[in-house]
């Protein structure tokens, strides 16, 4: 919360002033906190129902909540108990006391009007599947539209599936997609393996529960990953600053784990003359080709296109290991074709559509909605027989439903 506001620090009242910015990103919700009172490694000195005065008051929180609801932005509260301490869940011997505090806190904050909860580092929580199922049940019993998000640093699919357990609507952020080198073939394998393994679960996609996209992905792939995360079936989850390419400790004087959000030139206290101010929200908002502009466009498309929100997902085959291509389609809505080139050389995409239903079969030509390459002319019709991609380029293409 404090890093999001910038070098001067921030609180709940300050966050309320940033809601217009979050609205401009077309985000549907944000995770807040943890903001509860936590005495480091001291369970008795931790109160999950009391806001640490550093962040503001309960009145500030209520005001933020009401303002967010008016903008149709959901507020998810992070209740990871020992967020200042060494073990986020205290000692294993204290788990029953922690669980009792969690149940009371869930009830308290649901009554206060939050839209859901996040708990992180659940791989450190003993009997995590059991507790997650119980907390999920409490959350959903209050209201079906309430969410529970769990976070783990694990990239192991078996451990992830164990954490998901029988909690059908649980969203889980993990390091799964960042578990190996990036090639189109490898990414296709990871995505299809995850979707097949989770079956009826609504998926969430991220590269880490807390890490920054720009710290995990090389600069030449960041735009490609934004396109990927926004167009996979499920919910994309980003960290603050991912939309501008914020990196952990990218600038002198920044805290390593929670870098200051770069709003404008005043956010660069130690970088005068470094020329890096083009990373700020202010400068990127004025640049149509910036990472922020791409993020806004993708978020807008995902929010209004049913095929991207709810649509079926079909992978297209390609002889090129650098390429990953898939179709998203829903009912009689416009269809979307995504083609991603993870390689450092250009390719002509040869796409095989076996197994794709006739209602989503590929036409001879498609319309280019956007490219991750700022030099590419958009809004034009492209022949699929001659679909050329530049190095590290991703394309979002669309074509109409044909009965």
Image: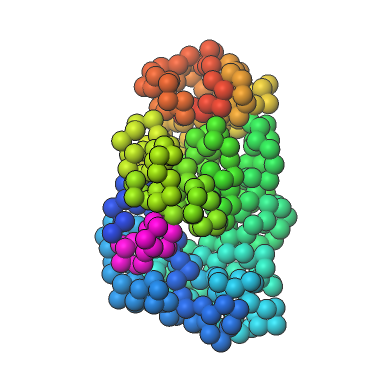
> In percent of the image, x 40 and y 48: which residue is there?
268
Residue 305 in sight in this render: no
In depth, the one of 311 and 249 nearer the eye is: 249
Residue 317 shown left or right of residue 297 in the figure: right
Farthest-out residue, bottom = 44
Q: Quadrant of residue 323?
A: top right
Q: Position of residue 4 (x, y in %)?
A: 41, 57
- Image quadrant holding the N terminus, namely bottom left
Q: Position of residue 11 (x, y in %)?
A: 36, 67
In depth, the one of 308 and 220 nearer the eye is: 220
Q: Position of residue 332 (x, y in %)?
A: 41, 34
Residue 119 shown left or right of residue 125 in the figure: left
> In percent of the image, x 58 and y 18: which residue is there?
346
Residue 373 in sight in this render: yes
3 inside magenta stretch: yes
Compared with 21, 342 (above or below) is: above
Residue 305 shown left or right of residue 67 in the figure: right
> In percent of the image, x 55 and y 72: which residue is there?
84
In depth, the one of 269 and 189 nearer the eye is: 269
Compared with 73, 298 (above or below) is: above
Compared with 269, 380 (above or below) is: above
Q: Quadrant of residue 5?
A: bottom left
Segment tinted magenta in the rendering: 1-16
Q: Position of residue 162 (x, y in %)?
A: 69, 61
Q: How is the image coloured?
A: rainbow
> In percent of the image, x 71 and y 53: which residue is there?
156
169 inside magenta stretch: no
Total tally of numbered discs in the picture: 0
């Amino acid at each position: 919360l404090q890093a999001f506001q910038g070098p001067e620090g921030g609180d709940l009242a300050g966050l309320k002033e940033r809601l217009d910015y979050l609205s401009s990103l077309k985000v549907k919700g944000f995770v807040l906190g943890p903001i509860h009172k936590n005495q480091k490694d001291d369970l008795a000195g931790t109160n999950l129902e009391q806001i640490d005065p550093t962040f503001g008051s309960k009145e500030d929180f209520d005001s933020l909540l009401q303002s967010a609801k008016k903008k149709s932005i959901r507020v998810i509260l992070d209740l990871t108990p020992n967020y200042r301490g060494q073990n986020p869940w205290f000692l294993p011997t204290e788990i029953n006391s922690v669980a009792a505090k969690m149940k009371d806190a869930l009830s308290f904050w649901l009554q206060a009007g939050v839209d859901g909860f996040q708990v992180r580092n659940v791989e450190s929580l003993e009997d995590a599947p059991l507790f997650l199922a119980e907390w999920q049940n409490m959350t959903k019993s209050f209201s079906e539209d309430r969410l529970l998000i769990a976070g783990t640093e694990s990239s192991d699919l078996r451990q992830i599936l164990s954490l998901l357990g029988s909690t059908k609507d649980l969203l889980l952020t993990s390091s799964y997609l960042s578990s190996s080198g990036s090639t189109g073939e490898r990414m296709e394998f990871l995505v299809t393996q995850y979707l097949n393994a989770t079956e009826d679960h609504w998926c969430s996609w991220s590269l880490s529960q807390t890490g920054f996209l720009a710290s995990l992905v090389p600069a030449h792939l960041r735009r490609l990953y934004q396109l990927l995360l926004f167009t996979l079936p499920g919910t994309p989850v980003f960290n603050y600053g991912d939309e501008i390419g914020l990196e952990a400790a990218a600038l002198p004087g920044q805290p390593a784990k929670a870098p200051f959000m770069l709003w404008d030139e005043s956010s660069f206290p130690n970088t005068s003359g470094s020329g890096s101010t083009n990373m700020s929200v202010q400068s990127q908002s004025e640049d149509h080709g910036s990472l922020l502009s791409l993020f806004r466009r993708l978020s807008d498309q995902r929010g209004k296109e049913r095929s991207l929100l709810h649509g079926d997902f079909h992978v297209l085959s390609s002889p090129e290991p650098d390429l990953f291509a898939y179709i998203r389609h829903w009912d009689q809505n416009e269809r979307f074709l995504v083609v991603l080139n993870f390689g450092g050389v250009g390719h002509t995409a040869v796409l095989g559509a076996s197994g794709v239903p006739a209602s989503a079969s590929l036409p001879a030509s498609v319309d280019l909605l956007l490219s991750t390459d700022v030099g590419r002319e958009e809004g034009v019709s492209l022949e699929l027989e001659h679909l050329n991609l530049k190095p590290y380029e991703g394309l979002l293409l669309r074509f109409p439903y044909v009965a």
